[in-house]
Image: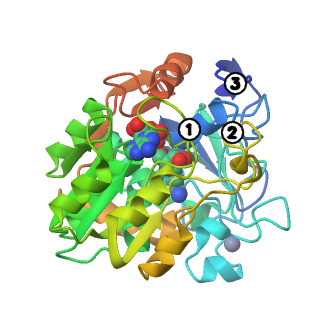
Amino acid sequence: MKATVYEGPRSVAVKEVPDARIERPTDVLVRITTTNICGSDLHMYEGRTDFEEGRIFGHENMGEVVAVGDGVDRVRVGDLVCLPFNISCGFCRNCEKGLTAFCLTTPDNPKMAGAAYGFADMGPYDGGQAELLRVPYGDHNCLVLPEEARERQSDYVMLSDIFPTGWHATQLACVQPGDTVVIYGAGPVGLMAALSATLKSASKIMVVDRHPDRLALAEEIGAIPIDDSKVSPVDQVNEQTDGLGADRGCECVGYQAHDPQGHEHPNLTLNNLVQSVKFTGTIGVVGVFIPQDPGSPDKLYKEGEIAFDYGLLWFKGQTIGNGQANIKAYNRQLCGLIQAGKAKPSWIVSHELPLDKAPEGYQHFDARDNGWTKVLMHPDGGSHN
Ligand SMILES: NC(=O)c1ccc[n+]([C@@H]2O[C@H](COP(=O)([O-])OP(=O)(O)OC[C@H]3O[C@@H](n4cnc5c(N)ncnc54)[C@H](O)[C@@H]3O)[C@@H](O)[C@H]2O)c1
Ligand SMILES: [Zn+2]
Ligand SMILES: [Zn+2]
């Protein structure tokens, strides 16, 4: 099969590799029809993780089931399915509680919790930017989609990661109807947090970034864009909230947060959040932070440490929630919102490419080139919309 393989910093190639196949009776084999490039892939693509050369990328996947193992009861050949980026078992202590991002049995390292397709430090699993994908514990992990999803894949594929992840940011931040919300980052995840806050009837949603194309997408769904290359985001949020600060804040950037000039400061968005969220406010952090980052220009962060305004956070009585999103906790209900026409997450999609064009997709999305807001690839050559 053809697959998108990591070849070292800022280099991917589409290569022939051995076909993915059923390895265990509980596996499902999926022929991938749509697979996305994610901001999480970019940390790996830039060589800022220990993702091994030769591994296959791709954790935002949907497609058609082409084979099932002998132990699979529910999922059938021919089903159209969307796969949560987390690979989970369904029966460990964490999965039982819905915390599938922290599954205890699917990582290969017993000291770790959580596994994913084509991801650094999250198990040995191949990614789905390929023609075929092996899905462990298929009955548990496959979200079987309604028939209409075949022609609306750019909406439904978002259930694999960024729509539930944006929702998770608003869950961690405890967004309630009527709340004011500030979101740092207008990448795909920040935009999905803005969509989620809208669906939760937030009264005012402010989105901070410096890319006009991304800010325009935030504005399209009624959020207030804040361009931090022109104004101080903290001042702007205070002005928009009568000097109180926002009720809730979402971090949707991660450890490669930088100033508008491009210099990385891994503490920048976190400290801006502490400053722009109100006393007793709540903050949800879904942007990725990692335990070690030897490639960081920040001396502390090489060891995963951050100069964090903890004193101010404490003084303001704020609460902060972190981590990978438990996609399965939300994907079925968010699927219902897509089906009912109440959510259309595809509004951020800028490019749909054949798999062969993966190197080009990575290059432009990584450069945050104007107009490259979300890239979908179709390994089967279809269009599906
Ligand atoms: N927790 C999860 O489950 C989960 C899931 C998916 C993605 N992620 C993470 O979410 C983060 C965002 O993903 P994405 O796909 O939107 O990526 P992205 O890189 O396309 O978007 C990040 C955006 O943040 C902006 N930005 C950078 N520094 C900023 C700053 N100081 N203030 C405001 N904006 C700033 C960038 O201009 C960019 O538009 C990444 O770290 C990704 O790994 C986490
Ligand atoms: Zn992703
Ligand atoms: Zn589990």
Position of 354 compared to 124: left or right? Answer: left
Mark 1 in CB contact with mark 2 (< 8 angstroms): yes
Vertical side of 368 occupied by 283: above or below: below
| Residue marked by disc 3 | 9
Q: Please state which amino acid type lies under the numbered disc 2.
A: Ser
Could you say which disc has been placed on residue 191 in the image?
Answer: none
User: How far from the left and from the top, in percent, is residue 133?
Assistant: 63, 42
Element under label 3? loop
Element under label 1? loop
Q: Quadrant of residue 5?
A: top right
Could you say which disc has been placed on residue 296 in the image?
Answer: 2
Q: Quadrant of residue 75?
A: bottom right
| Residue marked by disc 1 | 264
Q: Please state which amino acid type lies under the numbered disc 1.
A: Glu
Vertical side of 334 occupied by 211: above or below: above
Mark 3 in CB contact with mark 2 (< 8 angstroms): no
Q: Mark 1 Cα within 10 Å, few/some/many (few <14, many 20+)?
A: some
Q: Mark 3 Cα within 10 Å, few/some/many (few <14, many 20+)?
A: some
**Whether residue 27 is visible:** yes
* Front tag of 3 and 1: 1
Earlier along the polypeptide chain: callout 1 or callout 2?
1
Earlier along the polypeptide chain: callout 3 or callout 2?
3
Position of 251 compared to 142: left or right? Answer: left
In this view, the residue in front, 236 or 221, is 236
Element under label 2? loop
User: How far from the left and from the top, in percent, is residue 265?
Assistant: 55, 44
